[in-house]
Amino acid sequence: MDRRNFFKIVSTASAGVAATSCGKKEALIPLLVPEHQIAPGEEQWHPSVCTECSAGCGVIVRVMEGERIVERNGQKFRERIASIKKIEGNPLDPVSSGALCARGQAAVQSLYNPDRVRGPMHRTGDRGKAAFSSMSWDDGIAAITKAISATDKSKVVFLTTAPAGSRLAGIQRFLQSIGAPAAYTSSLADFSIERQAAQAVFGWTGMPDYHVSQARYVLGVGADFLGGWVSPVYYGGQFGRFRQGRLGIRGKLVQAESRMSLTAASADEWLPVRPGFEPHLLVAVGRLLLEEKLARAAEQLPPGVTESILGADLQQLIRSTGVDPNVLRRVARELGESEAPLVIGGASVIHSNSFQAIVASHYLNIMLGNVGRRGGPQAPHPASDVAAANPNVVEALKAAQVVFLDGENPVYTLPPSSGVAAALASKTIISFGSFIDDSAAYADVILPSHHPLEAEAAVVAMVGGPATSVAVATPFVRPLYDTRPLEQTLGDIARKLNVAFEPVTAKSFVQPLLPNGETWDNVALRGGLWLEGEANAQPLKPVSKNMQWSDPTFSGDALQFPLQFQPYLSVQYHDGRGANLPWMQELPDPASSAMWGLPVEIDPKTATKLNVATGDWVRVESANGKLDAPAYVHPAALPGVVSMAIGEGHTHYGRYASGRGANPISILAPAQETSTGVLAFGATRVRVARLEQRPSELIQFSPQDREQGPWGHR
Amino acid sequence: MSNSEHRWGMAIDLDRCTGCQACVTACHAENNLPLSDPESAAKGRAVHWIRVDRYYEGEFPNIRVKHVPVLCQQCDEAPCEPVCPVYATYHNEEGLNVQVYNRCVGTRYCGNNCPYSVRFFNWFDPVWPSPLELQHNPDVSIRMGGVMEKCTFCIQRIKRSKDDAAAESRPLKDGDVKPACVQSCPAEAMVFGDLNDPGSKVSQLAESGRATRLLEELGTKPKVFYLQKAT
């Protein structure tokens, strides 16, 4: 559906003439679709929010007739239901602009996944074995209430992946009412380092937003913004306009990354920086800009920062990055001379010093004078902050007595070397998830929430700031199973505990943000509240006024473990939660074209040395564990750097993910990013050896990665 | 070439494409593509009507990657058409290579003759563990075992757009029709439209100096134009 049609539908519907006749898609109703209103062949479009990641894309959902078999009193009946056919971006939403990434579109397969939890369950076998049998909601809530009453409230741990918005606000309010500590996250994809760096340099709360489309020259460092970083949808749109959306202007992208990511592949130039030397590269560029008088706003730098940059040993810095000095000098000059330069710093792979890299990228933008300007980093909306990351999540879990899991899967996203499984051994664990995943397998009680496509929500966009951008979902299909909205479950628990608790609804969340003349009904109808302007722009309140950089540290002896290991966030699996979607399993991996399993990416030189060819199986071993996986000899991998996308290797996560492939996190050392304490998942050394056996084939959709003859035939 | 009103074509701007594969999933959702499993995929039986090929050029560190989304090129001189013994694959009046599933007897000659490898054979009946089938698009028929399938340029979406325009008594405008892949693309790298309309965006892009076609030298006259990266 395009913008014009969607506008038209919204305007007709809001004028109150939404008819259901004449077979046209005029009905866009933020209400539950009653069965008698489903006509075969007629489509309806409903606004919703994608929650496959935290970016907060507004979507529209195509609903048509469907049929399911239900059993009543031992007899089978056909039941006609409104079913979801397709998810597209909401053309009114500034994050998605009408488009949507592969995983967002596959969310419908999470809704209709054959392995969804169909009702409340309690554990009947050993922890981690995923043996459950069903129970009633009343019993489930009674069990939880009993556990909470018996425990010291400071020992309640609530882990959530909820994006900024009504769900998170409701959770925090619930925890506050019962006197428990605030919820936090253990996800690998919360971009906590990016948030903390923005806080330190600009005093901003949330993710800075980069207006790539208005920049002319972009230097990306460490942030795979077209791939597994913040939002490939938002930045993909920005990138398209950056390249070919302006008459006579074509933006140039130079990407410095230690992996050939999607962003590096799309860039005009890729600077293969050695892992963990991103801060050095950025400081070197800063130094070159200052030296060549190309830092147009050098005076805005805190004096301490200027001093430390000028005090750096330039030769040494450049040498350490592994990038050709002449290339780096030219890039710095081009960046400084550009009309609209922009530096995007991020940590798609987290090294021990990633915080320093992002801080340095912010100082580069300050000296280039683009902060808060067109084509520069913009302040996020203050409401866009998510649950804080807790660097000591395992310690917190160890000390906890009651653990709530809402979307979080710490057993998967934290390395076993951190002791996470042992920490969960003797707690009362409650999962609100729709699936029995690696961590829910440890739960005592599973009280499944409605699927996001069945529930209401208000989600504050992670990007698109400083304007107000809240995508809103109101339920439009009947829940398929015996699930309940999380707000209701929390309300029931609070009532049993005799605690006053007012659940946060999408409406109550949005209402305070409404400007004069705007109504909730209109917001629900359009699927969001989007306000132009910078009324909410956060002022600059820098915390830090100096800059440091240090060499990265890697866990493991360099002689025994000569290679560096980089797990990374992929477009198909994100932090692993996309692995139960069959469309994502069969989506060819962008790097290797692998389906139904992920390979280890090894550079050609190392592969030759190890006598490894694509498809051979290798053992990747660190001081903390080992994994076996097929190899993909990646023509653009850095020599000595082994990479692997995160996503496979779930012990439990439904039929499509369980027991498939290997989890790269499972062999990591519990190394921390020095400044923030966040898991540095790119700071482990490994060794690789070829295995004689091939337990299974590396399945590639397009095995050829070089043109052969006129065109590479498959 | 026929004198029909429309002649559908596509332009793909490789300068915008990021290789994110949103188009691949969009196609699955729209067209009820059969679900693969590891066993069938290992035998080369996974089906993606559109794929993103990646080509590495040069050697590290001076290596570049080219992402090329490849779908049925809807050739004007389609090699798949003349080899079908039962006329299951034919050229319709709007220039599409159409596959009539009911007519197909599964000789696979068409797939064998396609230089772009974009035709797929259903070796078995497709299976969707319940309730995944609730997602099926009722506008598109499910293909059973023994039948060849391929990209249709989302002919059902073309039809819907035509019906919508007719219901409003107006002619179809440029941009009204968007196949699922085009609709989903975050970078707006894909443009679909009528090559008979010289004012359409796709016609103009096809005339651009950056426009090339895949394996043009074979004389297949594809209607998908690739705009090469500007450098």
Image (cartoon, rainbow, N blue to C red):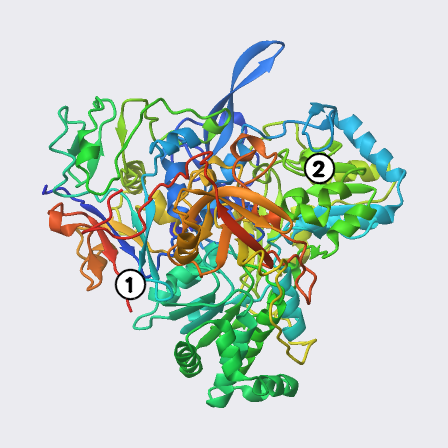
Q: Which mark is residue A431?
A: 2
- Label 1 marks which chain's residue? B
Question: Where in the figure is residue A458, as x and y percent of width and height?
Answer: 62, 49
Q: Quadrant of the N terminus of chain B?
A: top left
Q: Secondary structure at mark 1?
A: loop
Can you tell which mark lies on residue A71? Answer: none
Q: Residue at x 67, y 72 (%)?
A: A200
Relative to the observer, which residue lies in front, A506 or A20? Answer: A506
Rendered image quadrant of residue A70: top right
Question: Hey, which quadrant is residue A265 in on the image?
Answer: bottom left
Q: Give how far apart the Cα atoms at labels 2 and 1 are.
A: 48 Å
Q: Using the image, tell me which numbered label, if any, was put on residue B229.
A: 1
Say which element carries label 2: strand
Let me know if residue A8 appears in the view.
no
Q: What is the three-letter code of the residue carrying label 2? A: Ser
Q: Nearer the viewer, residue B69 or A397?
A: A397
Position of A626 compared to A66: left or right? Answer: right
Vertical placement of residue A328 versus A479, above or below: below
Which chain is home to disc 2? A
**Up-down relation of residue A380 to residue B43 (above or below):** below
**Could you tell me which quadrant the C terminus of chain B lies in?**
bottom left
Q: Is residue A202 above or below residue A275?
A: below
Q: Residue furthest top?
A: A74
